[in-house]
Image: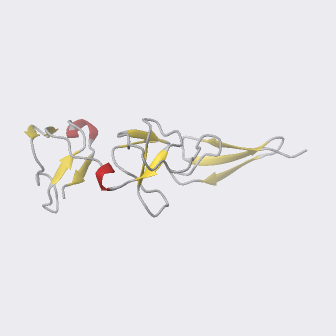
Amino acid sequence: MKKEEVWLWGQEREKRKVRKEEEVKVEKADKYSPTMETITHLPEVKEGKCFFPFHYRDGIFYDCVQFKVKHKWCSLNETYEGYWKYCSEEDFAKCVFPFWYRHLIYWECTKDGDSFGKAWCSLTQNYNKDKVWKYCD
């Protein structure tokens, strides 16, 4: 009879390898390591439309992401369910105008608050609450 392995995740970002009828072995895991029982990856859906924001593992993402792969990708569902695609130029997150930053409402990209003097914008209407942004092209 084969012994079955099950992966459990703790709040301290540790993975615990549990074997039936054996001791628990604890190993460190990186923040976005896959779980064997919960993440299903299907083949790329080339004609799909990116869904933003999307939930993936413990995060909420407002733009295409890149975890240990060559190209950025996005989920095609609000909560990642294995349906994804590689991002093209038109898939990357767009600036949201107007947006609220500090005590002002902005209708275009701004350099306010940027240490390097580069223009940026919010990816949500309320930067003060969400703190999600990108540099403008």
Res 40 → quadrant:
top right
Res 100 → quadrant:
top left
Residue 1 position in % (x across, y down) = 91, 44
Q: Give the left or right position of residue 122, taking residue 12 as reference.
A: left
Q: Residue at x 58, y 49 (%)?
A: 34
Q: Nearer the viewer, residue 100 or 15?
A: 100
Disc tally is: 0
Q: Which quarter of the rendered picture does the C terminus lie within?
A: bottom left
- Can residue 92 be seen in this snapshot? no
Q: Nearer the viewer, residue 42 or 134?
A: 42
Residue furthest to the front in view is 47
Residue 132 position in % (x across, y down) = 27, 45
Above or below residue 67? Residue 3 is: above
Q: How is the image coloured?
A: secondary structure
- Can residue 65 be seen in this snapshot? yes
Residue 117 position in % (x across, y down) = 12, 61
Q: Which residue is drawn at 49% across and 60% down?
A: 68
Q: Which residue is drawn at 11% across and 55% down?
A: 111
Residue 74 position in % (x across, y down) = 42, 48
Q: Which residue is drawn at 47% across and 46% down?
A: 84
Residue furthest to the right in view is 1
Q: Which of 87 and 137 is in front in this view?
A: 87
